[in-house]
Image (cartoon, rainbow, N blue to C red):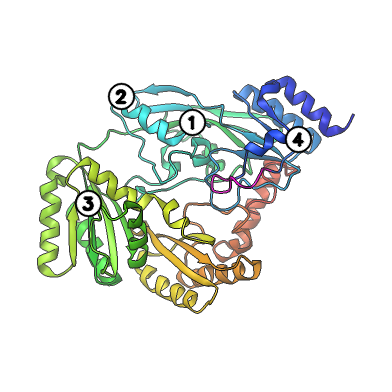
Amino acid sequence: MDTVDSLLERIVDIVGADNVLLGEELSNHFAHIWQTHIPLRATAVVLPTCVEQVSPILTLCNQHEMSVVVHGGRTNMVGSTETDGSELVISMERLNRILEIDSDSKTVTVEAGVILENLHRAVQEVGLMFPITYGAKGSAQVGGMIATNAGGLRVFRYGMTRQWVLGLEAVLADGTVISSMKKLVKDNSGPDLKQLFIGSEGTLGVVTSAVLRLCRPPANQQTAFVALEDYPAVLRFLKFMEQELGSALTAFEIIWKDTYRNMCGMLKGGGIPLAFDYPLYVLLETSGDASSCGAGRLEDLLEKCLLRGDVLDAVVAGSETQQALFWRIREDVDHIVSQCTHDQHFDVSLPVADIGAYVDRVTAALDRVLEVDKYFVYGHMADGNMHLVVSKTVGSEELKERVNHIVYTPLREYGGSISAEHGIGLHKKPYLGYCRNPEEMQLMCTLKNALDPKGILNPGKIL
């Protein structure tokens, strides 16, 4: 019997025939939620329901040297879930239980396939909050969020995913289960092993469960759109709001003029916060008690800025519905992607002071490329994370690399990174040396070889 057939038979024995997709059944599966028109190429898709199934599956794959790619919500932007047809795909969608919400310790224990938005709703019901959030929250899963160390819209106040992971369970390439599902904020008993898996993009182990920290939601939350003249004015405005609001300043998003106009297109002309004729827009959020960030407090600060000429225009959301609308403008990236033909997505980081000069430099270079028909610039300015979506009239590899060069090369000069929160995957791998030195990359290889000597886990990704 063929080795692959024998392997699949043994996997069916582990998970049951209903949890293995083969042949034509793969046509309803795909590598990314934006590429549902492309059928998945894989040997099979396996849908385990517990860690006790994931472990023997990986043991068998390691013995047979069968490559494995893990699928979560498939919202990644760097090719981390792409396959070439020879791999076994392990989908975490049926490992989707919220195992415990502990209100006293402010923790939640979840399996890797729990969708982020479902987690938000579950903890909200008991008066708690998990603060990591981003536009793909309705599809993204906790395991993928951990594997990519996702950031999102509130990093400025709450940090990246790794700050909210207390305990972790992961399965190594040989099937060994590494489980430290503790609810401890402080545990200094040697190296923090869970950090090996956070941000590793499935190359060192398969995350199956986690204990996540929670916090109390703020009593008051205010959201405003502000228009400004240029990037130096944005820097001054950020400094002022930080001085006045301190930790109550939760988010500070920047959107360039043409991007704002196109983002507002999803409103179909109704409820647009500010006119389209300003150079730059900031979407900011405050949260805390009534004295630190009530509606009156934010309005007073913005009025002071307007009177001094520091900002050109401003509007504070007058209700929770309007707050949600403001954030929908920023989060609904699908709307601007739908206007692109051959799109490339970038997620870079650099010192906040250099963002304006960097964007001017990159967009000027893109304007000189005839095949680039439009681009959209926006990002989490307060933590130095910029997003850029580039639309092209043709999809050649040569043009793709030319655009990559335009976006990534200046980062060396600014001491930036090619990836702020999306990871490396396949698409950014050739450019990793732009922000990592040879010694760092060698250490990454050493870790990979130690934990996955046969190289079966997400092969070819990152390194």
Number of residues whose C-alpha sits closer than 10 Å to that of mark 1, classed few (under 14), some (14–19) or many (20 or more): many
**Secondary structure at numbered mark 3:** helix
Q: Which numbered mark, 3 or 4, is in the foreground of this view?
A: 4
Q: Mark 3 or mark 1: which comes first in sequence?
A: 1
Q: Position of residue 289 (x, y in %)?
A: 17, 40
Identify the mark at residue 126; answer none if there is no mark: 2
Up/down of 225 relative to 219, above or below: below
Kind of residue sitting beneath label 1: Val
Q: Which residues are magenta?
A: 32-40
Gap in Å between the C-alphas at discs 4 and 1? Answer: 26 Å
Residue corresponding to mark 3: 246
Q: Mark 4 or mark 1: which comes first in sequence?
A: 4
User: Who is closer to the viewer here, 283 or 102?
Assistant: 283
User: Who is closer to the viewer here, 258 or 83?
Assistant: 258
Q: How many marks?
A: 4
Q: Position of residue 37 (x, y in %)?
A: 61, 47
Q: Mark 2 or mark 1: which comes first in sequence?
A: 1
Q: Which numbered mark, 4 or 2, is in the foreground of this view?
A: 2
**Secondary structure at numbered mark 4:** helix
Could you tell me if residue 127 is visible in this image? yes
User: Who is closer to the viewer here, 220 or 215?
Assistant: 220
Image position of 197 (left or right of 286): right
Q: Position of residue 102 (x, y in %)?
A: 37, 22
Image position of 304 (left or right of 317): left
Cβ atoms at labels 3 and 2 below 8 Å apart: no
Residue corresponding to mark 1: 114
**Secondary structure at numbered mark 1:** loop
Residue at the bottom extreme, as displayed: 368
Q: Which quarter of the rendering shows the N terminus?
A: top right
Residue corresponding to mark 4: 62
Q: Residue at x 79, y 25 (%)?
A: 9
Q: Position of residue 75 (x, y in %)?
A: 52, 45
